[in-house]
Amino acid sequence: MNATHKPYLSIVVPVYNEEDNVKPLYDKIRNVCEEIGESFEVLFVDDGSSDSTFDMLSELRDTEPNLAVIRFQKNAGQTSAMAAGFEYAQGEIIISMDGDLQNDPADIPKLLEKLNDGYDLVCGWRKERHDKFWSRRVPSVIANWIIGIVTGVAIHDNGCSLKAYRSEMIKQVPLYGEMHRFIPAMSTIVGARISEIVVTHHPRQFGTSKYGLGRIWRVFLDILAFKILLSVFALPSIQNEQGTNTSSNKHLTYKYNVFRVAAFLCLPFLIIGFFLINISIISALCIIGIGFSLIGVGMLTGASLSKTHREAADLGRFAQFFIYQCSRRPIRLFGPISIVITILSCFSYFILPNIAPFPLYIGIIGFHIGLFGEVISYANAKKVNDYTVEIFLNTRNEVMNLDNNIQ
């Protein structure tokens, strides 16, 4: 590829311990791209692999002018790897796919054809999946159904990494934590037109899967967090861009959503308090007030931060805590812990009824603080990365050591 011209097509492939897959996958991608006949680049993002994945990619790059390699200083997760790939990609069209040979590069022309029908994002649908039934397929069906209901974006297979994007669209979408599952819904924030096609899915031949039943809990927390972001934080901006809200109505809608979601989140705590712990009306009002205050302050803070262009060093200490100390997903720390504390408060009522309300209050505060941190991370997702790029081997035959570029 000519160094002075940007490619038409960028293929982004996050990999983690895929030493046996990277070379055959690159060969397949290169062959398909050459048949397409457009200029292209392939970006492998090594998410801190502990095997020889990076060494194999480095050797391969010495003979392949269209191959670029990004290496993270440490493992940061699939969403971070995809976010880095999107950031460094130069093509007009970006294709993302897994690095385990289960996605088929032969489907790339079909994705491009559908994209050219006027869409900004085309998602792959693994209609015939070759994964374990109970640990992969069943949870995926349930999660996709719930995601469709919660987000309003009815995609059959949100977890399929094989997707095609218009570059100007996907580069506007804030990705952080583990939000790669919600790329279609997140893309609606910037007004993306979305479609999907059936793609081929192969059984894994080499290496081991990085997912299992343990991710079910994380997916449901993601769904909850995303619903908060979409309904309270992102929705007013979408409506404003589409011209459906005046400035006055936008603020009214925003405040209404803040109170509505805060009340919704307080509801299960109130039910527990009234029926299991017998809290008073005054205590119930305190719970509602806490929910309103924390969610409201969180959303307003997030909205304020998203409008600024400040560097990370200019952020307040509270915001820095949620971004750095709980950088991946704040709700990961506060969400599960607060729910466990709330459950324990129910059991403690039968032993120490006078003390039981206090763990409940702690659980409520912790849960809403987690959501506060969630919107802080969302607001700064385009300013503060969850990853650190250590080395970037680009397609211009340069080796850029970015070891000191700590985001």
Image: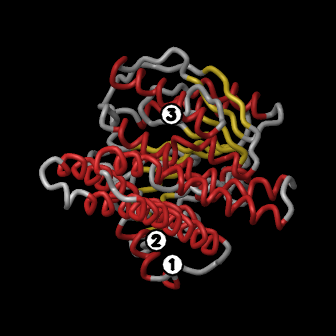
> Along the horizontal axis of the image, is 90 left or right of 321?
right
Circle 3 SS class? loop
The correct choice, above or below, for 219 with respect to 226 in the image is: above
Circle 2 crowding by C-alpha within 10 Å: few under 14, some 14–19, many from 20: few
Q: Which residue is mark 3?
A: 159
Q: Residue furthest bottom?
A: 314
> Along the horizontal axis of the image, is 137 left or right of 184?
left
The three-letter amino acid code for the residue at tag 2 is Gln
Q: Could you say which is closer to the camera, residue 121 or residue 283?
A: 283
Using the numbered discs, state the Cα–Cα distance from disc 3 to disc 1 in whole angstroms.
31 Å
- Would residue 368 be visible to someone looking at this image? yes
Residue pictured at 29% horizontal, 45% vertical: 276
Dot 1 or dot 2: first in sequence order is: 1
Using the numbered discs, state the Cα–Cα distance from disc 3 to disc 2 in whole angstroms.
27 Å
Residue 354 is situated, as x and y percent measured from the top left of the image, at 20, 60
Residue 384 is situated, as x and y percent measured from the top left of the image, at 51, 69
Q: Residue furthest top?
A: 128
- Would residue 81 be visible to someone looking at this image? no
Residue 332 is situated, as x and y percent measured from the top left of the image, at 36, 54
Circle 1 SS class? helix
Using the numbered discs, state the Cα–Cα distance from disc 1 to disc 2 in whole angstroms.
9 Å
Residue 264 is situated, as x and y percent measured from the top left of the image, at 53, 49
The correct choice, above or below, for 233 with respect to 41 in the image is: below
Q: Which residue is mark 1?
A: 312
Residue pictured at 43% horizontal, 78% vertical: 318
